[in-house]
Image: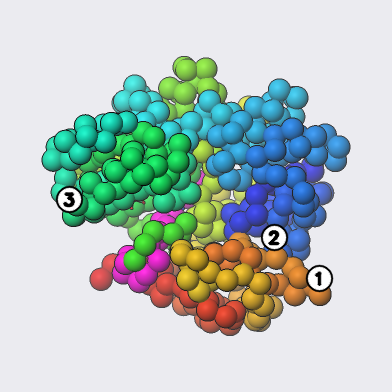
Amino acid sequence: MRIAVVGSGGREHALLATLAQSPEVDRLFAVPGNAGTAEVAENVPGVGATDAAGLASFAEAKRVDLTIIGPEQPLVAGVADEFLDRGLPVFGPTAAAARIEGSKAFAKEVMAAAGVPTARSESFTDPAAAIAALDDFGPPWVVKADGLAAGKGVTVTGDHAAARAAVEAALVGKVHGEAGQTILLEEFLEGPEASVFAVTDGRTVLPLAPARDHKRVGDGDTGPNTGGMGAFSPLPDVDDDLVEEIRRTVLEPTVAELGRRGARYQGLLYAGLTLTPAGPRVLEFNCRFGDPETQVILPRMTSDLADLVWAAAEGTLSGCKVSWDPRAGVTVVLAAGGYPGSYRTGLEVEGLQAAAARPGIHLFHAGTALDPDGRVRTAGGRVLGVTALGDDLADARARAYQAAELVQFGGAHYRRDIAAPPP
Ligand code: AMP
Ligand code: GLY
C-alpha cells in the first residue's frame, strides 16, 4: 500500500514512523514533512496543506492508495471532500463533519442534540450582551473563540476585567479574525483532563488508548498555553470501563448525530474531556489526531495502524480490533527558546543519534528541517518530541528525560514534570 500523510509536525512523523513498520506499506509520502519524516518517507515539498486540488492530484499522479490528513485546517477547508469527489480513499472527515472542531458553537449544538455531557455554554456576537452575561458563568470565566484560532482562542481567568477584555478582544478588536466573530461563554469545569481518540468509519467507533496532554508551557501548569508540551499514556484515572463509558456516552452518539445530519464521519474523532466528580464532560472535539498525544499513543499500538486507517476509510471497521503494549509511554516536547512567543529558527540540533540509541526511545521531529549539508536545524516552536516506553510511568518518564538531556540546540527548553504524579 502507498500512503501519503499531509502535515509537517510531530504527529505526522509519529504516523509515518508507525506506518513504516507495517508489512502492508511499501511506499510513504510526507506532504511536506520535516527532517524526521525524511528518514521514513519521501518528503514532498511544494503542495500546500489546504490546496485540495493539488493534494488530490498528487495522490492520483503517484497512485497513492490512501491519504491521511494530519492537521485540522485542511479538513475544515474541505480537502477530504475533494478526495471523496474524485473517488480517492482518504482518512479524515469532510468539511461538514470537521465543523465539530471548526465551530465550537456547532459542536455544542451537536452535543445538545445527541445528549452528550459537556459544559453549559452560550454563544454571542454582541459584546455588550456577552459582558452582561459574564456573571451567569463565572468566576472563573471561560471565554472561547468559536472558530479555529491556532490554540490561542481560549481564555480561562478568575479576573472579571480579564474576561471582559477577552470578550472585547474577540468581538471588538477582532484579534482572532473571523474565528472570533462568535464567542462562547462556558461553565468552568474542574478536574483532570483526558484525550480520548476514536477511529471511526461513521458507524463503528473504536477508541484508542487514552492520553493526557500538558498544555501550559511551565512546570506545575503555569504560564501560557502551548500546542502541548508533553503527554503520557495510559492514564491511572481512566480505566477500560471509563473508556467504554466515553465511547458509549460521547463518541458514538456524536458520530451518529453527525451522520443523521448527513455528515458521515470517517477518520479520527478526538474528545478532549474533563473528568469531573459527576463524570466525564467534553471540553472540545478535534477532527484529527492530537499532538503530542499521537506521539505517545502510537508507539504503544501493537496492532497494524495501516490496516486500521484503511478500514476506516473503506467503511469496514466493524470487526477490527486494536491492541496495546502494556508498557507506559511518556513524551517530552523540546521547544525553541521563547516558544510559545516568538523564537529563532535555523539552529543546529545535536545529539539526536545518541538519544535515539537509548532503549525504548522514539524521537519524533516537529519543527525541524534539513539544511543543504544534511544537518538537522530548528524550523518551528515545538522542535522535537522524545517518547520513551517503560515498565510503568515512572520508568518511562526517567527514560524520556535521560534521552531529552542528550538533545541540544540553542535556547531549548522543556517541562520537567511531564507525567509526574500530582503534587
Ligand atoms: P480547548 O481549546 O477548548 O481545549 O481549551 C484549551 C484549554 O482550556 C483546555 O485544555 C482546558 O485546560 C481549558 N478549558 C477549556 N474549556 C474549559 C472549561 N469549560 N473549564 C475549564 N477549563 C477549560
Ligand atoms: N493536544 C492538543 C491538540 O492536539 O489539539
Whether residue 385 is visible to the viewer of this picture, yes or no, is no
| Element type at mark 1 | loop
Dot 2: within a 10 Å radius of its alpha carbon, few (fewer than 14), some, or many (20 or more) residues? many
Q: Say which label, 1 or 2, has the lower sequence index.
A: 2
Q: In which quarter of the image is residue 393?
A: bottom left
Query: Which amino acid, by three-letter code, is at mark 1?
Result: Pro
What is the residue that sits farthest to the left in this orientation? 135
Residues in magenta?
207-222
Badge 2 is on which residue?
Answer: 34
Which residue is the site of mark 3? 160
Q: Residue 178 in magenta?
A: no
Residue occupied by mark 1: 372
Secondary structure beneath disc 2? loop
Q: Distance between the residues labelled 3 and 2?
A: 43 Å
Q: Which of marks 1 and 3 is nearer the N terminus?
A: 3
Q: Quadrant of the N terminus?
A: top right
Closer to us: mark 1 or mark 2? 1
Seen from the viewer's position, the closer of residues 404 and 128 is 128
